[in-house]
Amino acid sequence: MELLGMNPMRTKMTRIVTVLVLVGFILGVRGGEARKGKVAESFAYTGISCRRHTASITDFGGVGDGKTSNTKAFQDAVNHLSKYASDGGAQLYVPAGKWLTGSFSLTSHFTLYLQKHAFLLASQDMKEWPVLKPLPSYGRGRDAAGGRFTSLIYGTNLTDVIVTGANGTIDGQGSFWWQKFHKGKLKYTRPYLIEFMYSDTIQISNLTLLNSPSWNVHPVYSSNILIQGITILAPVKSPNTDGINPGINTKNNPNILAPMLGLRTVT
């Protein structure tokens, strides 16, 4: 694994291939309840891929003080590492700290790794959340008639992407959005924590998702999705903070597997 940046970081990763039983479709999960469709088939999935290149968010000016915006640092890092997609892929390492950020987009053949005690804090500056058109299958926004804010971690038309860690935390700081929703002050639909569109071979694992503005994980028009080792926390009265909400798939089988989830509501 080639190391980029000033401080070499060595993360031991093992290439494993696991044959998984697929859940054909999973409806929204909330309050510890999950409804599952028929089991479809099995497929071989590379659980953790070794990436040839890696870098730390600090190499791109990231500051984990909980106050400094790191939106540009994250997007610059992903854009830089995207050039290694055809050369063994790349990993972006997020060390312990509080990393305030708005929405940023991922790239193919890429791993986002959150170390233990690493917290991604969703920005409360609405200027850091670009607005997208409504989903084609929806035709309008869910919270308002217009578009929707881009999800915190977002990807479209991607393949081979992993969002994982040593139980790092993605904190949506949702109360900011929930208050606006209840007061009817939103022009656009609230963002999700993680969303992939028109993508395949995606893994989301070993993370805590906390206080999402709306849905936590939203794979839509996508296939071959593995979600495991995830803890999802939100207050009982938080609006629409579903755990996993798969959208319509353009193919016959979405192939979404979600074992070993910890789903809880807190008061």
Image (spheres, rainbow, N blue to C red):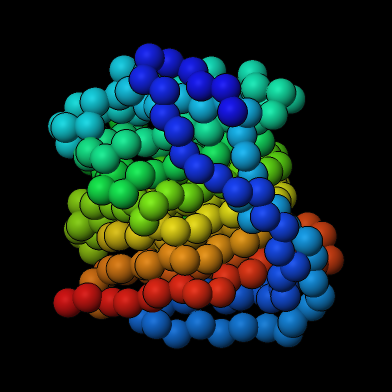
Q: Quadrant of residue 213?
A: bottom left
Q: What is the x, y in percent for residue 104? A: 45, 34
Q: Is residue 37 above or below residue 65?
A: below
Which residue is drawn at the image coordinates 43% and 49% (left, top)?
Answer: 165
Q: What is the x, y in percent for residue 45? A: 73, 58
Q: Is residue 248 above or below residue 111?
A: below
All told, the count of numbered labels is: 0
Which residue is drawn at the image coordinates 42% and 23% (left, top)?
Answer: 8
Q: What is the x, y in percent for residue 230? A: 44, 65
Which residue is drawn at the image coordinates 37% and 36% (left, top)?
Answer: 94
Q: Is residue 130 above or below residue 248?
A: above
**Can you say which quadrant of the picture contains the N terminus?**
top right
Which residue is drawn at the image coordinates 66% and 36% (left, top)?
Answer: 109
Q: Is residue 178 visible?
A: yes
Q: Nearer the viewer, residue 162 or 19?
A: 19
Q: Nearer the viewer, residue 230 or 243?
A: 230
Q: What is the x, y in percent for residue 139? A: 61, 54
Q: Is residue 147 visible?
A: no
Q: Quadrant of residue 231?
A: bottom left
Q: Quadrant of residue 160?
A: top right
Q: Nearer the viewer, residue 92 or 198?
A: 92
164 vs 125, left or right, is: right
